Structures are given as structure tokens and as C-alpha cells.
Image (spheres, helix red, strand yellow):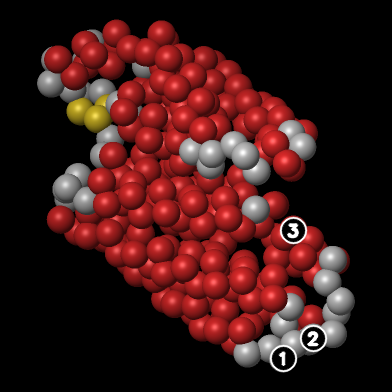
């Protein structure tokens, strides 16, 4: 095997899978297949990742709420991550091991974490927006300025979409470009903090929305920290912040689960 080829390691795929689900796994396995010049297998891997993600969410939503509330938040991710780890071991384990032993290169762990992050955002986007705009409001007496609330939430969502767009090009752009884009994203997350503070100032805002705003504030603060760590990792061209990036994303994931 040519040591010049570059792969995502089994550990990196596992990390991305825990945070981004089967979708992240399918994408990274596809990238490894592309490196092996097996594009058809890569397409199959991505399709399987997408279908598995849909089936996963259908399965979760079909579980009665009293039962799902008793399941630890980490249990389901641990189950599908374990399954993906076994699959990667079966299909690429020997290839990745041989590549490592021959001194071959692997993509940075923070890149895999970033891909896991963008996959998670894609997964929760529909649910997140539904809860923020329609779900909670549909069950609440609209005796507050809902138009202002919806307008601010729409801006919040727009900022988030723009802030995470950098993850779409994280593999193809230069370090200088990525640092610039992540710094722009920091500004957007800071603006989202201000948006949530304005939401808290709306008179007669229901308690459930006030509680939700508290979680959104924490979410924005964690996003800012996450971006700052990634900027450090890129600037210093190091993997020493990977553990902190993973821990911060774990906290982000927890907040997102709380918002569901």
C-alpha cells in the first residue's frame, strides 16, 4: 500500500460516529473508499449511512416517551458507535493497520470531530427548528410578542447555518482560510448570544421558552469555545486540543439532547 495515501483512522471514525451518528460514519468510510479508489463502494457506504440515520430516528421516535425518558442519553450513541466500530474493523481494519505500520498518514482527529459536528447539526436541524418555532408555541397561549420571537429565532437559525458552513469545506481549504472562517463564525455565535438575551426580554414569555433560552445561552457559549479550540488546533497545526474539542462537543451534544 502506498504510504502517501491518507485515511481517517478507526478511532477518528468512531469519534465522529458518536457525535454525528451513522451519517458521519458513512461519509468518512466513503472518504476512505475514495482513497482506495473504490468510488462505488464509497457511494454505497454513504447511502447506507443516510438510510441508517433515517431508520435510527424512526426507531427513536417510535419509542413511547415514558420509556425513552428512562434510557440514558449516552446509551443509544454507544450502541450505534459500537456497531460502526465493528463494521469498520471488518471492512478496513487490516488496511488501516497496515497503513499505520508502514508510516502512512491519517487525517487530524479534529477534522473528524468537525465532520461529526456538522453531521449532528444536519440531524437535529429539523427537530430543533420545529421545537423552537412550532412545537412549543403550538402548545402555549400566545399572549406574548410571538412575531418578534419568531423573527429573532429565524435570525438565530440563519446565523447558525452560516457559522457551521465552514465544516463543509474543512477538508479542502487552506489553514489560513479556515482560521478566517472560524473567526467569522465566532462573531455569529456572539450575535446569537445577544439574540437569546433579547428573547429573554420579551414580556410574558412562557416559562418553557425561558428555560429553553437558558439552554440556548449555554449552547452558544459552548459553540464559541468549540470554535476557539479548533482555531488553536489549526493555527498551531497540532492534535493536542483534540481531547478538549471532543469534550466540548460532548457538552454541546448534551445540550442539544436537552432541547429535543
Where does residue 149 sit, x and y in percent of width and height?
A: 72, 80
Dot in front, 3 or 2: 2
Q: Is residue 18 left or right of residue 50?
A: left
Q: Secondary structure at mark 1?
A: loop
Apparent side of residue 222 relative to residue 230 in the rendered image (left or right) = right
Q: Is residue 177 visible?
A: no
C-alpha gap between disc 3 and disc 2:
19 Å
The secondary element bearing badge 3 is classed as: helix
Q: Does the CB distance between marks 1 and 2 fall below 8 Å?
A: yes
Q: CA distance from mark 3 to mark 1?
A: 22 Å
- Taking depth in this image into account, of 65 and 1 the one nearest to the observer is 65
Identify the image quadrant of the N terminus. Answer: top left
Image location of residue 211, percent across then percent down:
61, 71
Residue ID at (61%, 84%): 200
Q: Name above or below for residue 19 compared with residue 195.
A: above
The image position of residue 70, as x and y in percent, is 62, 39
Residue of label 3:
130
* Lower position in the chain sequence, tag 1 or tag 2: 2
At a point 68% along the width and 88% down the height, the residue shown is 202
Which residue is the site of mark 2?
144
**On residue 108, which mark appears?**
none
Amino acid at each position: 500500500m502506498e504510504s502517501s495515501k491518507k485515511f481517517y483512522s478507526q478511532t477518528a471514525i468512531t469519534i465522529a460516529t458518536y457525535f454525528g451518528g451513522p451519517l458521519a460514519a458513512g461519509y468518512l468510510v466513503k472518504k476512505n473508499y475514495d482513497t482506495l479508489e473504490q468510488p462505488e463502494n464509497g457511494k454505497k457506504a454513504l447511502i447506507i449511512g443516510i438510510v441508517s440515520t433515517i431508520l435510527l430516528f424512526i426507531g427513536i421516535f417510535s419509542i413511547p416517551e415514558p420509556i425513552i425518558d428512562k434510557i440514558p442519553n449516552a446509551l443509544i450513541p454507544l450502541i450505534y458507535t459500537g456497531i460502526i466500530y465493528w463494521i469498520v474493523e471488518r471492512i478496513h481494519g487490516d488496511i488501516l493497520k497496515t497503513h499505520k505500520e508502514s508510516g502512512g498518514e491519517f487525517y487530524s482527529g479534529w477534522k473528524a470531530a468537525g465532520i461529526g459536528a456538522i453531521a449532528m447539526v444536519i440531524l437535529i436541524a429539523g427537530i430543533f427548528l420545529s421545537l423552537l418555532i412550532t412545537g412549543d408555541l403550538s402548545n402555549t397561549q400566545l399572549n406574548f410578542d410571538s412575531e418578534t420571537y419568531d423573527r429573532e429565532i429565524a435570525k438565530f437559525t440563519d446565523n447558525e447555518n452560516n457559522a457551521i458552513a465552514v465544516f463543509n469545506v474543512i477538508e479542502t481549504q487552506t489553514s489560513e482560510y479556515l482560521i478566517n472562517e472560524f473567526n467569522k463564525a465566532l462573531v455569529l455565535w456572539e450575535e446569537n448570544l445577544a439574540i437569546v438575551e433579547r428573547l429573554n426580554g420579551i414580556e410574558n414569555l412562557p416559562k418553557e421558552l425561558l428555560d429553553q433560552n437558558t439552554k440556548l445561552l449555554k449552547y452558544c457559549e459552548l459553540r464559541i469555545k468549540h470554535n476557539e479550540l479548533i482555531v488553536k488546533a489549526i493555527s498551531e497545526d497540532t492534535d493536542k486540543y483534540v481531547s478538549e474539542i471532543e469534550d466540548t462537543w460532548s457538552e454541546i451534544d448534551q445540550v442539544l439532547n436537552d432541547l429535543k
